[in-house]
Amino acid sequence: MSAHQQLHRRLGTFDATVIGLGSMLGAGVFVVFSPAAALAGNLLALSVVIAGAVAYCNAVASAALAAKYPTSGGTYVYGRKQLGEWPGFLAGWGFVTGKTASCAAMALTFGSYVAGDYAVPVAIAAVVALTAVNLLGITRTALLTRILLCVVLATLVFVAVAAMVGPHPAADEPLADSSGEPVGVLPAAGLLFFAFAGYARIATLGEEVKDPSRSIPRAILAALAAAFAIYLALALLLLNHLPVGELVGTQTPLLQAVLQSRLAAGAPLVQAGAAAACLGALLALITGVGRTTLAMARERDLPQLLARVGGKHTVPYAAEVAVAAVVILLLLITDVMTVVGFSSFGVLLYYAVANASAYTLACHPGYAPKWLNAVGFVACLLLAFTLPPASVLTMTAVLAAGVAGRWLVLRLRRKFST
């Protein structure tokens, strides 16, 4: 790979942490507690703890690998280096396809919050605008992420205060589905896990972080610790403030918590915070998918045209524009909110490969012992297969199509090279 194709190291530890935390505090924090509570009931906080534990296993595996392989691509690169080309391809293909659908869903969520009937045009405008920010360079991406993260954090603090000062539910308020709580703890943890998956964005930016062997592990662990504390605190406050039945019955649990408090007049602030969270998560997603696409193109697992890097700010412009184009296409031709579910299975497979890759490292840092990699691998597969069958089958079909396509391309290359 020639020098002009390399990305420049412009991000410090703080910027990398902000990008990771911005990904983890995306739109999900404003909606995930309702479906998770429907599964786990009063044990919602336990599901958060389990999800956080699995995320920690994956985070330390990613940190150890990113320190050794400080280049763009994340687990796609780690899998290729430690396990072979095919495991790496499965991780990269699952990440790119699943997260591209997530980008479309995130954009549509933003459009729905701010424009109602004009959600799709506004979503497309958001994708174009954020891609333009990315093309201005990674430091611009980090700056905008800082601004959006500040808005989101201020909103979450306001929700927490509203939950603490607001009236408590009546003691005799009926609870929903309490008998099924233990059975639903693991599925709820599988759902909540994706709230913590933003640290992957830090690893995919490995080629753009200063002093990566030191900065990347610190950024990953700091972002995860902050996100875990926030999600656990919110889960406990919501359970204390709202009856479980009311928490389950709303699609906007944080907004509902404010509406049921003495600070109900501040509801528009929550809506603005949700919109900012959508933009922050979408910005980080487009960045992460673009870098993984770049890495796959460099290895010819995607068209080499996508490996082009250049411009004044040295960005992977071909990959960024291609990702944006596919996201816009999904917004125009599909109901993205119904197809995005399969990305969950792809992300868990991605982290299973990360744990397996870390397990094979010759040297393990103190924060990532070998046994923890094994626990993470098993936990990822366990959570993956608690997902709805439709999600598992859909992503399996997408993965199979990718494998078949790569096998055919490799066969044709061998045929024409002889």
Image (cartoon, rainbow, N blue to C red):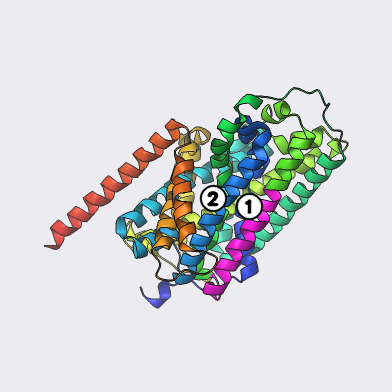
Quadrant containing the C terminus in the rendered view: bottom left
Q: Is residue 9 at all visible to an observer of this figure?
A: no
Residue type pointed to by label 1: Gly
Q: Is residue 255 left or right of residue 306?
A: right
Q: Is residue 172 left or right of residue 17?
A: right
Mark 1 or 2: in front is 2
Q: Which residue is mark 2?
A: 54
- Which sits earlier in the primary sequence, circle 1 or circle 2? 2
Near mark 2 (Cα within 10 A), the count class, few <14, some 14-19 or many ≥20, is: many
At x 63%, y 48%, the residue is: 26
Q: Which residue is mark 1?
A: 280
At x 63%, y 25%, the residue is: 179
Q: Is residue 308 above or below residue 252?
A: below
At x 49%, y 50%, the residue is: 324
Near mark 1 (Cα within 10 A), the count class, few <14, some 14-19 or many ≥20, is: many
In percent of width and height, residue 93 lies at: 38, 50
Depth order, front residue of 410/382: 382
Q: Which numbered circle lies on residue 250?
A: none
Question: Hey, which quadrant is residue 21 in on the image?
Answer: bottom right
Q: Secondary structure at mark 1?
A: helix
Q: Is residue 220 at all visible to an observer of this figure?
A: yes
Question: Hey, which quadrant is residue 274 in on the image?
Answer: top right
Question: Hey, which quadrant is residue 59 in on the image?
Answer: bottom right
